[in-house]
Each structure stands twice: as C-alpha cells, then as structure tokens.
Amino acid sequence: MTNKTILITGATRGIGWDIARLAAKAQYHVILNGRSQEQLDLRVKLLRTNYPDAQIEGVVFDVTDRAAIAQAALSVGPIDILVNNAGIALDNWWVKMSPNDWDDVIATNLTGVFNVTHFLTDNIKDGGQIVMMTSRSAMLGNMGQANYAASKAGLIALTKTLAQELKRRDIRVNCLSPAALTDMTVPAMEKVKKRYDGKLPEEWQIGSSKQIAEFVINHLINTTNTGQVYAVNGDEFGYWEEPTYHTLRIKS
C-alpha cells in the first residue's frame, strides 16, 4: 500500500488506462484524466469496483484547454507523480500532410504537455516525478510521421531541460519511449512493416500496453535518475544514451 498520488493524462484507454489499473492495484491514490466525462466516469467506477481499497478520482480536461487545466490544478491538490500520457497521431506522407494535421498533433503532444506540466508543477511535491511519453520515431524518424516525430522529439528536449530546472526541488523528470500495440499505433506499425518487407526490425519490437504500465509502476517511478530516456520494447527494457559529438575534419 502507498500513500502516493499519481495523475495520468489520457487515462481512459491504451497505455494510460493500464497505468491507472496497475496504480490502483498497488493502492495509489489515482487521478485519471480524460476528455469525455462519460468515459471517465465509467473508468473511475470500474477501478473503484475492482480495487475498493484504492482512492480513485477523475478530472476532465482537454490538454489543449489551458483554462480547464488551470481550474483542475486548483482542485486536485498535491500529487507525487504526473504521467503525461495523452497524445494523438495523424499520420500522412509529408507532401500530403495538412497544416491542420501538423498543428493538431503539436498542440496535443507537445504544447499539451507544456500546458499540463506548467499548471501542475506547483502541485507536484518536492521529491516527486514527471513522466513524459516520447517515441522511437522521435529519435529514428518514421516515414509518414513528421508531425508526430517532431512533437515527441520536443518532449525529449523538454524532459532534459526540466530535469535541470526542477532538480532544486528534487523533482525527477524522465522520458519513456514505449513500443506497444494500441489503437493509435497500429497504422504506424503497418507502415513500418511495409518498409521492412512485412517484418518489424528488432529495434521496433512491439509489446503490450500492460508491459509498458508494469515498467512505469514497478520501475520508472521509483528511479532516482532524472533526465533519462527509457525504452520498453516487448520484454526488453533499456535506455538511450546521450548524443555524441563528433568533430568534422573538413579539407580547405
């Protein structure tokens, strides 16, 4: 049993929902976030039924709605762990990608994380943790995902910057690159398969959202590290090393 409070954005489905379930099972005080009051109420009711010893709440806001987030920050109280999980994917080839598709993905995946983290930083207890969800696409690129890859690459830079700025409060900020088959990732994985003759390369191995959640609850939120980019690829756990600088020798 724990007396820690965890707030998870995008917690009504996929990875966010599995993180919420495992946190409730471990008897965290779980605050689920979603955009739909109806879906959120159903998820909260289900967790309360399955885990009666856990404290479960729901808070409705869209991560792009700053006024709603600011209001939520006044009501949720102190939290120990913030998981920025909410995100969208609107994939298309670069030449076919509309400005709206670019703007919507950046607004949710990058600016949305700014919004939530900005308004909730004062709620996070000293010694707490912020978890960002990035993607392998952010580091390796992925055709048809220019908007998604750019948004997730921005989260890596944000993670490393906040890790430095919030160190004075001992707030750890880490990033996770999950590889899980969800309703959002299926189209992207099909595109990757086409690039590699119908098979996923080793570095793109896919697991389940439950495996991601287990890593978050059992390992990541207990780490003393900060500013790291972790990865879960099926049963394999790892981390990405810092970029290496190489000097160019240019002949004059």
Image (cartoon, helix red, strand yellow):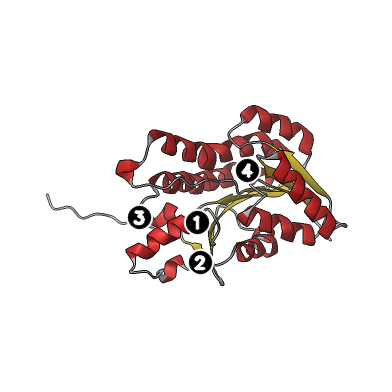
Of marks 1 and 2, which one's residue comes earlier in the chain?
A: 1
In this picture, residue 119 sits left or right of residue 105: right
Report which residue position mark 2 lands on: 206
Report which residue position mark 4 lands on: 166
Of marks 4 and 2, which one's residue comes earlier in the chain?
A: 4
Of marks 3 and 2, which one's residue comes earlier in the chain?
A: 2
Q: Quadrant of residue 194?
A: bottom left
Between marks 4 and 2, how big is the CA–CA gap? 33 Å
Mark 1 or mark 2: which is in front?
A: 1
Q: Nearer the viewer, residue 107 or 222?
A: 107
Between marks 4 and 1, how big is the CA–CA gap? 32 Å
Q: Are marks 4 and 3 in contact (CB under 8 Å)?
A: no
Give me the disc on residue 110.
none
Q: Residue 75: where, in percent of width, then height?
A: 78, 34
Q: Classify 10 Å Cα crowding around label 4: few (below 14), some (14-19), many (20 and above).
A: some
Q: Are marks 1 and 2 in contact (CB under 8 Å)?
A: yes
Q: Classify 10 Å Cα crowding around label 1: few (below 14), some (14-19), many (20 and above).
A: some
In this picture, residue 88 sits left or right of residue 91: right
Quick one: SS at disc 2? loop
Between marks 3 and 2, how big is the CA–CA gap? 30 Å
Quick one: SS at disc 1? loop
Q: Residue 124: where, in percent of width, then height?
A: 72, 42
Q: Are marks 4 and 2 in contact (CB under 8 Å)?
A: no
Q: Nearer the viewer, residue 17 or 134?
A: 17
Of marks 1 and 3, which one's residue comes earlier in the chain?
A: 1
The disc labelled 1 sits on which kind of residue? Thr
Quick one: SS at disc 4? loop
The disc labelled 2 sits on which kind of residue? Ile
Of marks 4 and 1, which one's residue comes earlier in the chain?
A: 4
